Amino acid sequence: MNRYLFVLMGVLLVFTGCRKDVTDGLQPSPLMVTDIDGNTYNTVQIGNQFWTQSNLKVTKYRNGDNIPTGLSDAQWYSSTTGAYAIYNNAAANDALYGKLYNWYAATDSRGLCPTGWHVPTDAEWTALTDFLGGESVAGGKMKSTSTQPTPGGWNSPNTGATDSSGFTGLPDGYRDSGGGFYYLGSNGIWWSSSDAGSGYAWFRRLDSYYANVFRYNVDQRLGFSVRCLKNTLPQVNTTSVTKVSYSSALVTGEVSPDGGDQNTTRGFCYAITTNPAISNDTTMNGTGLGVYSDTLQNLVPLTTYYVRAYATNSLGTSYGNEMSFTTTSLTIGLNYAGGILFYIDSTSKHGLVCAPSDQGSFQWGCNGTNISTSTAFGTGMANTLAIVNGCSQRPIAASVCNDLVLNGYDDWYLPSRDELSLMYQNLGTLNLGNFSNTNYWSSSQFNSDYAWFVKFNGYVNFNFTKFIYYQVRVVRAF
């Protein structure tokens, strides 16, 4: 990076947001955190965030692996893996300002910050500056008031510096991608963990001449300081419910931010009562930040559901705002509950479906044997069981239905005469249901030698001898 770029950037003022009294959210924090090397850091709460009050000094990742250092200018330029440097390789600068890490170290999966802490995202830096009144004034509230010749102080004029946030930003300079060190005393610069694409990443800069915070993206090979942010519960929103049908709905949510935990899991929880939680029905929809969606399935028609997006990290589970929706009603001819809908009761939640196709041609069975059955609507299941228990002949129409497992259901039966008639009226006459132009057995006996069937070519109820072969179409209730 050209050493004069920061001078050019310094003249660009960014004005955003409205002023806010920082003292309303600044809380003294007794919390101290220790890195894997044993270095300790004071912390400060600014708004809802906890920040380390000084720059990171660690030489190892959280798992104990050493972070490479001592790279020559050429090695620093060509490196695409984590490394750190000390400004001008001077121990005094290490003590005052901490280390300068390239972006690869800041975002290494082994973790640069102590356990429970992370390198802040671009959005988390923005949350900080927004809380402090916007980028045009936040810099002064983040800069140390110390000036040269005090060690670690800013060059004059240190414009707007009050350190009212407690961030205590120091002018730590940076290492250029070519290996050179620049702007000690003039600039304080910190990485975010957010990739800007094409080998660039987002960062924040404070300047001795301005009260601003400057947001830019730059070559990931540069060496900047790192501040750590305490992990929190993820923030999640339930953004929309669309494509609601009688049995499904498309739900969309978003996790932002994830609280600093890369293993954040996310999904939706839903129920017919308010405030659904992960103890209710849930989906799981991957991990991490961003927008996600899922289709809730197997819902009950004409029922009001409540849904919330959720996200879980190592600290616990957060829930988004609650949304509600009501599934639509069922209509004749729908594919539902394993078959084709041909009857709905007054609640619009229960009814009868028939199989999508015929089960074949079979005898009614046990000609000459009297089996007690009914022709009435709602008696098909009882009729089927009576036939199976009272007639040992196999296969017959009733046994084929009783033994069938179809589309995940095993409670199929041979419909009664009146159920079969309704199937013809509501489906057959409309050319729905893929019926053959022939006769279908019911489960209703006429006498010991005859049983009822329905002619699906010009609808007529007939009875005929039980040993004749007619088509079978199974039914189930839901």
Image (cartoon, rainbow, N blue to C red):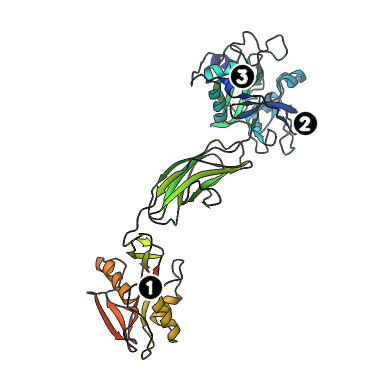
Q: Residue at x 64, y 21 (%)?
A: 166
Which numbered disc, 3 or 1, marks the residue that appears first in the sequence?
3
The answer to which quarter of the image holds residue 132 is top right
Callout 2 secondary element:
loop
Give the numbered dot on residue 38: 2
* Above or below, 278 relative to 345: above
In the displayed image of the protein, which residue is found farthest to the left? Answer: 458
Quadrant location of the N terminus in the rendered image:
top right
Q: Marks 2 and 1, Cα distance to the nearest angstrom?
A: 74 Å
- 44 above or below 414? above
Residue that badge 1 annotates: 474
Can residue 248 be seen by looking at this rendering?
A: yes
Alpha-carbon distance for marks 3 and 1?
75 Å
Q: Nearer the viewer, residue 71 or 362?
A: 362
Counting every numbered tag in the picture gives 3
Q: Secondary structure at mark 1?
A: loop
Could you say which quadrant of the image residue 373 lies in?
A: bottom left
Q: Give the number of the mark in front: 2 or 3.
A: 3
* Amino acid under disc 3: Met
Which image quarter: residue 348? bottom left
> Which residue is disc 3 drawn over?
142
Q: Residue at x 76, y 28 (%)?
A: 39
Describe the element under mark 3 as helix, strand or loop.
helix
Q: CA distance from mark 2 to mark 3?
A: 26 Å
Nearest the viewer among 34 and 18 is 18
Image quarter of the C terminus: bottom left
